[in-house]
Amino acid sequence: IAWINEKLIFINTRFSCLATVSEKYSFEPIWRPKFVTALQPEDRCHLNGFAAGAGGIKFLTALGKTDTADGWRENKRSGGVIVSYPDSEIVSTGLSMPHSPRLYRGKLWVLESGLGELQTVDQKTGQRTTVARLPGYLRGLTFFDRYAFVGLCKIRETNTFGGMKVAEMYPELQCAVYVVDIERGEMVEFVRFTKG
C-alpha cells in the first residue's frame, strides 16, 4: 500500500488487481495483469507487492502467472514472477514466493521468500543475484543508507505455504527483522521475536 500521485494504491490479492479506495464500493480496481482475464474473488495469481519509483508503480510480484482460482498454488515453489507495469510484461520467472519488490539506488530488489533470499534483479534480463540469505520466510523490505531492513517470519500455515526450500535449509525459521549491509551482503544486526 502506498500514496502514489496523491492516491492511495494497494494490492487486492483476492481480486488479483491493483486498487484504490472507493466511496461506493469496497475498492475500485485500477489495473490487473493481462494474463488475468476476469476480476473475480479467486486469488488467481496471488499478486502481492509493487515497487514504485519516480512517476509511480514500475514492477509487481505475483506467486504465479495463472488465471484460475488459486492457480498459483500448483507451482508455488517456483512459479513466481516479476511483472512490469503497466504493460504486464514478465521481467523474471521461476521465483519461489516473490515478495516486497522495491526500487532503491537504481536497482530492483525482491525477497525470494521461499528461498529466504534478498536479491537484486536485472530489469532487462531478469537475472537475479543473491545479496543475502536469511533464516526465515521473508516479508517486508525497506532501506536506509547502505542497509536493508528485512522482515522474517515462520511459515504460518503449512498446507498453503509449506514445502518451501527455506524450511529445509534451517532447523527452525525465525520471526525477526534483520539488518543487511547491502554493500557487503552481510547481516549486521537483528531483532528476534520469540513470543506472540
Image (cartoon, grey):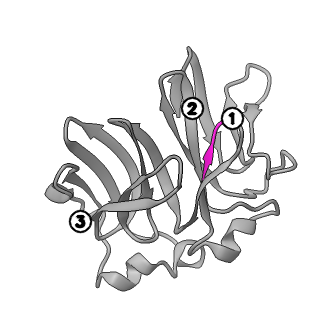
User: For the point 16% across and 55% down, which residue is it?
Assistant: 184
The residue identified by callout 3 is 194
Q: Is residue 84 magenta?
A: yes
Q: What amino acid type should be assigned to the residue bearing mark 1?
A: Pro
Query: Which percent across, then down, holds residue 191?
Result: 18, 55
Q: Amino acid at mark 3?
A: Thr
Secondary structure of the residue carrying tag 1 is: loop
x, y (%) of residue 60?
Answer: 58, 45
Q: Which residues are magenta?
A: 82-86
Q: Nearer the viewer, mark 3 or mark 1?
A: 1
Among numbered discs 3 and 1, the one appearing first in the sequence: 1
Figure check: 162 above or below 26: below
Whether residue 153 is visible, yes or no, is no
**Residue 147 occupies which quadrant of the picture?**
top left
Residue 102, percent from left and from top: 43, 42
Disc nearer the start of the sequence (1/2): 2
Distance from Cα at disc 1 to Cα at disc 2: 8 Å
Q: Crowdedness of circle 3 by 10 Å Cα count: few (<14), some, many (20+)? A: few
Q: Which residue is under mark 2?
A: 57
Q: Which mark, residue 146?
A: none
Marks 2 and 3: which is nearer the front?
A: 2
- Position of 127 compared to 171: left or right? right
Q: Residue at x 69, y 33 (%)?
A: 19
Q: Is residue 20 magenta?
A: no
CA distance separating discs 3 and 1: 41 Å
State how far apart marks 2 and 3 are (Cα): 35 Å
Q: Are marks 1 and 2 in contact (CB under 8 Å)?
A: yes
